[in-house]
Amino acid sequence: MKFDTPAGNNPIDQLKVIGQPVDRIDGPPKTTGTAPYAYDRYDVVPNQAYGYVLGSAIAKGRILSMDLTAAKTSPGVITIVNAQNAGKLVKGDLNTARLLGGPDIQHYHQAIAVVVAETFEQARAAAELVRVDYVRSKGTYDLTAVKGKATPADVFNAAGETSVGNFMGSFAPAAVQLDAMYSTAHESHSMLEPHATVAAWDGGELTLWTSNQMIAWAVSDMAKTLGISKEKIRVLSPYVGGGFGAKLFLRSDALMAALAARAARRPVKVALQRALIPNNTVHRSATIQRVRIGATRDGKITAIGHESWSGNLPGGGLEAGAVQTRALYAGANRMTSNRLAVLDLPEANAMRAPNEAPGLAVLEIAMDEMAEKLAMDPIDFRIRNDTQVVPDFPATPGSSDPQSKKAEQTEKPNPHPPFSKRQLVQCFQIGAQRFGWDRRNPKPGQVRDGRWFIGMGVASAFRDNLVTKSAARVRLDNQGAVTVETDMTDIGTGSYTIIAQTAAEMLGVPLNKVRVRLGDSSFPVSCGSGGQWGGNSSTSGVYAACMKLREAVAQKAGLSATDAVFSDGHIRSGSRSIALADLAGGRGLVAEDVIEFDKLNAQYQQSTFGAHFVEVGVDAVTGEIRVRRMLAVCAAGRILNPKTARSQVIGAMTMGVGAALMEHLAVDTRYGFFVNHDLAGYEVPVHADIPHQEVIFLDETDPVSSPMKAKGVGELGMCGIAAAVANAVYNATGVRVRDYPITLDKLI
Ligand code: MOS
């Protein structure tokens, strides 16, 4: 099904099941320990050996020699695989560095060997006995030091740099000006479930039970890496214990398990040890950003410029902190610049709300600073500069699928497309009232509660709504039950639940008659989970397949699908009513379809909006910061399930507090690695850090986004929240910190 005209009235609009706060279908299996995560697949894979991955002890250079003698004779050891004996490997398309290093080393903790043994402890003990001698070469590890060498780089398929009007000519004479530098830290995804894979070969065929967000990408990249055809690889990832972008792409656990299983001639499981993950896999790059805003005395922006610098390994992509500044606020004269420097740190890549999360963390402090200079309320200042069309070139047109972005690239016919729906102002108005914004004292450092300074802050939330083609298969059986199959993943987001709701709504069957099967490459290829496109796009694929199934059912019944009503397990038209179970026949009825987005998507800027409100307390003596209350008001199209959507937003808000106050991979700039590479040294918020969160969704539908009229929400909640915290800290104390995270040493 091509989605090329705005969605009209359709079966989803009945809202009998869609839009209901249904409990997560995967909740009971997860909380009772019966959901099979990759590392637990004893049920389907007998005789597993354990692989332990050894990471490089240098960041850049060469392995001179690797002595395996002692390790090989260690108890329980079956085999050891390294670059010398692994056979020919090709670097896949999606990882910046090779997943198995040697003799050349590209980054610290790059996998250089996997030791396979009967038990995990034996594999780990033997790995300690591998003797590696290196020669280290000089690397570049400090973003600040190489910032001047950074060059403009593209953002998805959009240009890295844009210019509209005359920025410099308008900024210089502006009545009120801000010109400030900011920085955000290197961050680690820190999902709960580590990267883990069980690999098993059957002749030349490989099966991987793994933890991955994008099944089809994993299959094709593994095929390329091993030089075998995609048809010979099956990837299963029905449960994922968090990803946040770290599992968008194949990682070393999967390749090392595959190589180890081939060498050991039996199934091998590999889980990356926690202390290996931050340097072995991927992180979000730190950024340095400069924001310049010029405005008239009455608060109209006349010039806005945003520059962002980030770093990555050669060939890697950038963290584009300036992109949202093309679309968020009005202003006739503007420039954005996203630059990338080469660093020899581990791979930087997408982490939840890539670009916008660090970009808004900065822009929204700048807006707060500017409002203060103007003596305006920060909400009034934002409302004053609202826009219903994109004032600059759109940020991220089309799909962000790295394997098809060239093919799917579409020209935006209008350089200043309208937003399909934009209710940013409403988000602020509703939030201000609900949060009690009128109780905020605009003068910082004035409000005390015992030993605490109290402050409030706001920020805009903004994130593009990407849509990506997605397929599904739906089967109706002679019991009237429906099975949905798609290689979509559920990374803790609620995919199982909203897909079941979609099928139940479309086919008029109760929710408990729908079974959803996900995360298997033998199912139709979905959009996968990433970029907050998963919920809307995957359910749209299910919608398309259900439309086909409705036709098949109607045909069987001798009825017209357009006139028929599907409800209570029956198809009805006029005076006729036939049970679906009776129409399915012995072999059932099956339909498969794919939803494809193209031209319509290119005519509008599709974005999601929100307003974040935060209240903090700052200890007057120690500088300790405690978040007291948080409220997010979101406008993100139809909310398919308010319970799962709320969970997404509060999780994102929590992650944003981490970015604001805690998260910081500290670089050893001499040796080129992240020092605090485990959950003891890398701090993330815990329950005690987040006392009170509230989420309000505006009652919105977006007929341009998809037949579901929904949008993404999983990343929106993370956008702007760090700045709302920072602005609240400023309001509490009068200390403006422009370097994240805002740790207490920066306050006193
Ligand atoms: Mo997301 S960072 O695209 O999983």
Image: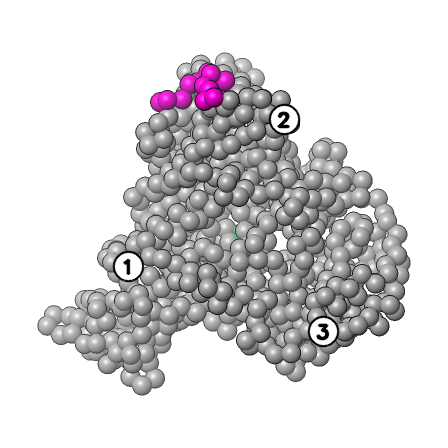
User: Mark 1 sits on what residue?
Assistant: 17
Q: Three-letter amino acid code at disc 1?
A: Val
Q: Report the mark closest to the observer, 1 or 2.
A: 2
Q: Where is residue 584 in the image (x, y as percent from the top left)?
A: 28, 80
- Is residue 716 in view? no
Q: Which of 236 and 340 is in front in this view?
A: 236
Instruction: Mark 2: give few (<14), some (14-19) or many (20+) Cα within 10 Å.
Output: some
User: In the rendered structure, are the residues bearing label 1 and label 2 in contact, judged by CB atoms less than 8 Å apart?
Assistant: no
Instruction: Mark 1: give few (<14), some (14-19) or many (20+) Cα within 10 Å.
Output: many
Span of residues in magenta: 438-450
Residue 441 forms part of the magenta stretch: yes
User: In the rendered structure, are the residues bearing label 1 and label 3 in contact, judged by CB atoms less than 8 Å apart?
Assistant: no
Mark with earlier residue (3, 2) = 3
User: Mark 3 sits on what residue?
Assistant: 118
Q: Quadrant of the C terminus?
A: top right
Q: Where is residue 135 in the image (x, y as percent from the top left)?
A: 88, 52
